[in-house]
Image (spheres, rainbow, N blue to C red):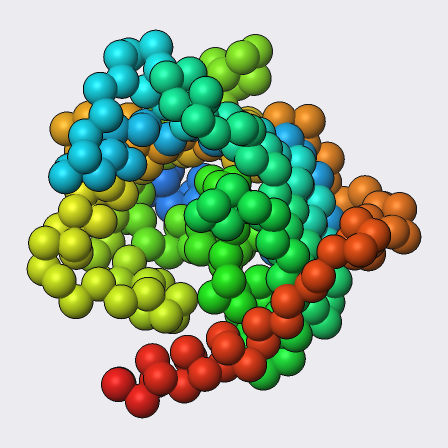
Amino acid sequence: MLLENKHTRMAPVFILAACAILLNLSACKKSSPVQEYKDYCLYVLNETQTVSCNIEMVLDNEILQDPANPVSINEGNRYLRTSSILYEAAPDKLRVESIQILPELLAPAFKPQRSLLLYDGANQWCEGADKENKMQYRRVKTAGITTPKRPFDTHLNNRDSGLMLGEGLLGSMRTIFRIYTMREVFTDNLNGTECIVLEGKLNEKEFYKYLEDSFQEFDNPKERSMLMDKFAFLQMYIAESDYFVRKYSFGPAWDRNYMTVSFSNIALNQEFPPDTFAYNPPAGVEIIDVTELIKRKLDQFLSKK
């Protein structure tokens, strides 16, 4: 009887202790969902050897205006859009075919601009219009310029696709996770796809380290402040089905409307045709080798450090 009474008295204590443990475990799970989803995404990135997709980039054209020569663009015409097709094979092959569509108000003066950025494992090939809207064909030998961690960073970059400087899609996502401190997570439906939405704030120290690694100089405090403002806020949509990116947006914290990059028709770890990363220039064009020019610029940059 005494034993029964003892256990009867102790039972509520055990129940309360068990409840406390469960509450603590629940709190731990809720305290770090951002880190958990980030780990899931990084695991998928590390397991991905090939990726192909369509990319749509929309850039707020007001940011591009020359303050000394402003152009009035209404809400319907203010955006610069780029459509791209991307093929990437780890660790060092990349093909991005793009067409840039200018706002309607500016379209009469500029034709849609087509560009090609291709890495075949030993060379970078670039096709794109110069300032006079004439096509240029350039080559960079990547040996001695790129590194295993940054296999697409020759410092001759195509910035129209919405990818990070000198990065493919896989590298861009890794960089984004590095330079942003993720703070919030929720779920949303994006065009019929259930997504986890991560929101983050730019980590100034990591961002400038990334720029320095890309040999980008922003010594002017005003330029630094403007750049920080453009990329202050991040919102990233990750599909719940495969933990791969479907959209990300950068922008000022007060607006969040600077650049939006959307991905569709995503295929992971599929084989590509053998000629996917072979460069075949148009007949009769002049290909300019800028390898030595880039090396000299890098040497000059490093000599200042």
Residue at 28% from the left image edge and 12% from the top image edge: 75
In the picture, measured across the screen, residue 8 lies left or right of residue 267, that is left
Residue 236's x, y, as percent? 41, 33
Give the farthest residue toward the left: 221
Give the farthest residue toward the right: 274
Residue 138's x, y, as percent? 63, 62
Which of the 4 image quarters holds residue 118?
bottom right
Q: In this view of the protein, can residue 245 be seen by the observer?
A: yes
Residue 136 against residue 12 in the figure, above or below:
below
Residue 44's x, y, as percent? 61, 46
In the picture, measured across the screen, residue 237 lies left or right of residue 170, that is left
- Quadrant (top left/top right/bottom left/bottom right) for the C terminus: bottom left
Residue at 15% from the left image edge and 38% from the top image edge: 67
Residue 21 against residue 220 in the figure, above or below:
above
Residue at 42% from the left image edge and 16% from the top image edge: 104
Residue at 55% from the left image edge and 81% from the top image edge: 292
Residue 221's x, y, as percent? 9, 60
